[in-house]
Every structure is written in C-alpha cells, then in structure tokens.
Image: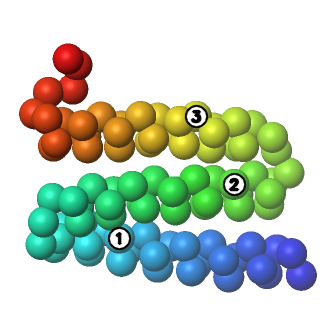
Amino acid sequence: MLSNVILIVSAMIGVSLLLNLWRLLRGPSVPDRILALDTMYINSIALIVLYGIKVASELYFEAALLIAMLGFVSTVAVCKFLLRGDIIE
C-alpha cells in the first residue's frame, strides 16, 4: 500500500512542478517568478525524499538536505539583489 501512496503523491508533486514551471515562464512579475522557482526546488526536495522512502536509502535524504540549504541561500541572494542591487555589501 505504501508504494501505491508514494506513486500517487509523486504524480501530484509532478503536476505541481508543471504548474510551477508554467508560473515561472508566464509570471507577471519578477517576485512571482522567484516564488515559483522557490516552490519548484521545494517540490523537487519532496520528490527526492519520496524516492528515498521508496528505495529505503538514507543517501537521498542527505541530498535533499543539501538541495534545501542551497535553495535557501540562492533565494536569499536573489531577493537581496532585487532589493538592493548588490549581493555583497
């Protein structure tokens, strides 16, 4: 039963990734596109974690943690660049 649930949830997250991609390409403003990109990396982390649960490997959880840290830093850097025009003061 767990494999069926993982398959269904993976399909739902895949659909949300496609909708995020649509918002990234058609976003009316730059903050909308940044938010779509931020949501896309969160959804990709969810897919990696689901795959790690499916194959019962801890390696995928560590990869998801690294992607989460890189995504957070990149989101902060892009927002700081949009607000001030410079990343490093």
Q: Nearer the viewer, residue 29 or 1?
A: 29
Q: Is residue 74 above or below residue 55?
A: above
**Label 3 vs 1, first from the N-terminus:** 1
Query: Residue 31, position in %: x, y?
Result: 21, 59
Q: How many neighbours does mark 1 have within 10 angstroms: few (below 14), some (14-19), or many (20 or more)?
A: many
What is the CA distance from the residue labelled 3 to the residue labelled 1?
21 Å
Residue 6 picture quarter? bottom right
Q: Where residue 49 is drawn, which disc sits there?
A: 2
Q: Which residue is mark 1?
A: 20
What is the CA distance from the residue labelled 2 to the residue labelled 1?
19 Å
Query: Residue 54, position in %: x, y?
Result: 79, 60
Look at the numbered disc 2 and give the secondary structure of its residue. helix
Residue type at mark 3 is: Leu
Residue type at mark 1 is: Asn
Residue at left offset 53%, top offset 36%: 69
Q: Where residue 66 is drawn, which disc sits there?
A: 3
**Label 2 vs 3, first from the N-terminus:** 2
Look at the numbered disc 1 and give the secondary structure of its residue. helix
Residue type at mark 2 is: Val
Drawn side of residue 60 relative to residue 75, left or right: right
